[in-house]
Image (cartoon, helix red, strand yellow):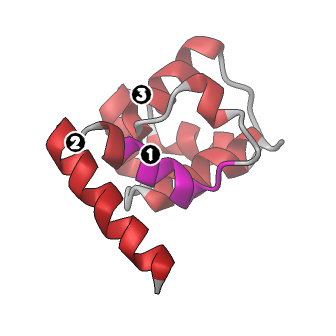
């Protein structure tokens, strides 16, 4: 897995610029660019901050089965109240049946 590409995919799935991500975690936009272009290394601490800013757990970040869209859906769904989750499940179940 290319960490830089994964960060870029998740950042774009969150409709976030490199500058916005950099500001959220207090690093320079050029460092985000270097990470995404795989021209620098990053610490686990920085990766943890990036994941938090992108709404992704470290374990999900390294899960190759989750696309950026899947991860964004999970993040949004997890933030919903239980009643809204239930309503969404009913809606999605209805889509499957069609």
Image coords of residue 93 (percent x, y): 41, 66
Q: Are marks 2 and 3 in contact (CB under 8 Å)?
A: no
Residue 17 lies, in percent from the top left, at: 40, 57
The residue carrying pointer 1 sits among few (fewer than 14), some (14 to 19) or many (20 or more) residues within 10 Å by Cα, namely some
| Helix, strand or loop status at disc 1 | helix
Q: Tell me, yes or no, whether the highlighted magenta stretch contains residue 72.
A: yes
Q: Label 2, on which residue?
A: 80
Secondary structure, magenta segment, majority class: helix
Q: Earlier in the sequence, mark 2 or mark 1?
A: 1
Residue at image position (37%, 74%) is: 94
Report the side of 92 relative to 38 (left or right): left
Q: Is residue 16 above or below residue 45?
A: below
Question: Which residue is painted at 63% across and 35% down in the image?
Answer: 61
**Residue 38, horizontal then vertical, whole percent:** 77, 43
Which residue is identified by label 1? 74
Magenta residues span 66-75
Q: Earlier in the sequence, mark 2 or mark 3?
A: 3
Give the quadrant of residue 26: top left
Q: What residue is disc 3 on?
A: 52
Residue that lies at the very extreme toward the front in this rendered image: 97
Q: Position of residue 88 (x, y in %)?
A: 28, 58
Using the numbered discs, state the Cα–Cα distance from disc 3 to disc 1 in whole angstroms. 14 Å
Earlier residue among tags 3 and 1: 3
SS class of the residue under badge 2?
loop
Measure how far apart labels 2 and 1 are at the Cα level: 10 Å
- In the rendered view, does 37 fall on the left or right side of 80? right
Spatial CA span between label 2 and label 3: 18 Å
């Amino acid at each position: 897995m290319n960490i830089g590409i994964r960060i870029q995919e998740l950042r774009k799935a969150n409709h976030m610029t490199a500058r916005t991500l950099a500001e959220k975690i207090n690093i320079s936009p050029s460092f985000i660019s270097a990470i995404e272009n795989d021209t620098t290394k990053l610490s686990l601490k920085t990766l943890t901050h990036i994941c938090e800013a992108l709404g992704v757990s470290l374990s999900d970040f390294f899960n190759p089965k989750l696309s950026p869209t899947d991860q964004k859906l999970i993040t949004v769904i997890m933030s919903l109240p239980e009643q809204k989750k239930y309503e969404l499940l009913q809606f999605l179940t209805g889509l499957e049946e069609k």
